[in-house]
Amino acid sequence: MLKRRIRSFKFAFTGIGEIFKNQPNAKIHFIAAILVIALGFVFKISATEWCLLILAIAGVTAAEAFNTALEHLTNLVSPEYHPLAGKTKDAAAGGVLLMAIGAALLGLIIFLPKIMVLFFGI
């Protein structure tokens, strides 16, 4: 049983690697996450703020993974164009966009006041 559990983690890490290797938007999200993490250290954010940022980064990454999985599955079952296949892909991409917007707003709420103090003394 332990061997199967370890193997399932291997499959999961392979999937994560595939997303960051082959999905351009995932690479953008990764770069944004690195920037946010660096800003977190620069501004010495609180534990609560770290928790929120970690959840946002994980949420965007998971949404990208689900989107990629749905794209692959849709391409498998509908290799030719079909309006419902297009709607499926659009909805999945919309989910990623909503999560990314939410993460960006969270980042603004956390970092904008700190940036204002740093640059404008406000």
Image (cartoon, grey):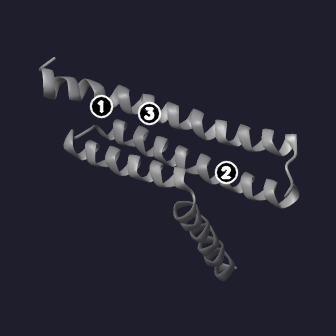
The quarter holding residue 110 reads: top left
Q: Which residue extends farthest top?
A: 122
| Residue 30's disc number | none
Give me the C-alpha separation between circle 1 and circle 2. 28 Å
Pointer 1 local density, CA inside 10 Å: few below 14, some 14–19, many at least 20? some
Where in the figure is residue 114, as x and y percent of width and height? 22, 28
Where in the figure is residue 73, as x and y percent of width and height? 79, 57
At x 72%, y 39%, the residue is 90
Amino acid under disc 2 = Phe
The quarter holding residue 118 reads: top left
Q: Relative to 14, is 58 above or below? A: above
At x 85%, y 49%, the residue is 81
| Residue 104's disc number | 3
> Is 17 placed left or right of 85 in the picture?
left
Pointer 3 local density, CA inside 10 Å: few below 14, some 14–19, many at least 20? some
Q: Relative to 24, is 17 above or below? A: below
Where in the figure is residue 53, as x and y percent of width and height? 41, 41
Amino acid under disc 1 = Phe
Camera-side residue of 11 and 3 = 11
At x 74%, y 44%, the residue is 89
Q: Which residue is mark 2?
A: 66
Amino acid under disc 3 = Ala
